[in-house]
Amino acid sequence: MSIEKVLIDRCEGKCELCGAKEGLVSYQVTPKEEEIVICNSCSSSIEEPTSNEKHWNCLHDSMWSVHPAVQVMAFRLLTKLGAQEQLEMLYLEPEVQEWAESGLEDENIEPTRDSNGTTLKEGDSVTVIKDLVVKGAGFTAKQGTTVKNIHLVYGNSEQIEGRVNGTRIVLLSKFLKKL
């Protein structure tokens, strides 16, 4: 795909995700018809970023781009990679956040559901319905514990991430109830 002069000027002749200067192509960020400039390395693993996780360390810089389309791609890639710390730092305007999440919804067909079958969403609060031993952390998440601002685990509709006793842990959604 040829790159328009406007895009080349905007990106200063570099990949907007990793900064590479070779093998540049345009990439459409759906569902809007906005494009970003990416290199061949980014292009080859953008659909399945876990196949080349080390390459995506570049997102620590590109997530701060002033261009919404670049922010959307950084959000989507960080979500697919499970990089919760970076996602917590990333602030997106509400309409940009909606755009970023809309691209992920198509891929994550099976929704995450609690023990009652209620669909869980990013940022929901849940309560633990039975005592759960947290392996490797040395404590038990007690029944009735509230977990606020949960994060959905990309690619696994049976798990969520949340903080219990100040520790970020993965919980099985079948042991949770939406508040």
Image (spheres, rainbow, N blue to C red):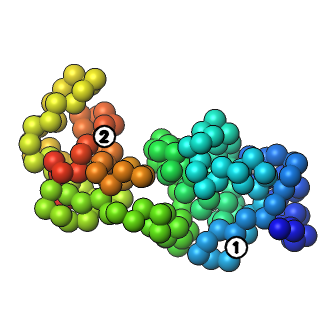
Q: Earlier in the sequence, mark 2 or mark 1?
A: 1
On residue 34, the disc is 1
> Seen in the image, is 174 located left or right of residue 106?
left
> Seen in the image, is 157 located left or right of residue 33?
left
User: Going 52% across and 67% down the picture, which residue do you hit?
Assistant: 103
User: Going 68% across and 77% down the picture, which residue do you hit?
Assistant: 33
- Residue 79 position within the rendered picture, expressed as x and y whole percent measured from the top left: 49, 51
Under mark 2, the amino acid is Val
> Seen in the image, is 85 located left or right of residue 149?
right
Asked whether residue 150 is in view, the answer is no
- Residue 79's place in the image compared with 34, above or below, is above
User: Going 76% across and 56% down the picture, which residue do you hit?
Assistant: 38
- Residue 41's place in the image compared with 103, above or below, is above
Asked whether residue 36 is in view, the answer is yes
- Residue 102 position within the rendered picture, expressed as x and y whole percent measured from the top left: 49, 70
Residues at discs 2 and 1 in contact (Cβ within 8 Å) = no
- Mark 2–mark 1 Cα distance, whole angstroms, equals 35 Å
**Residue matched to label 2:** 170
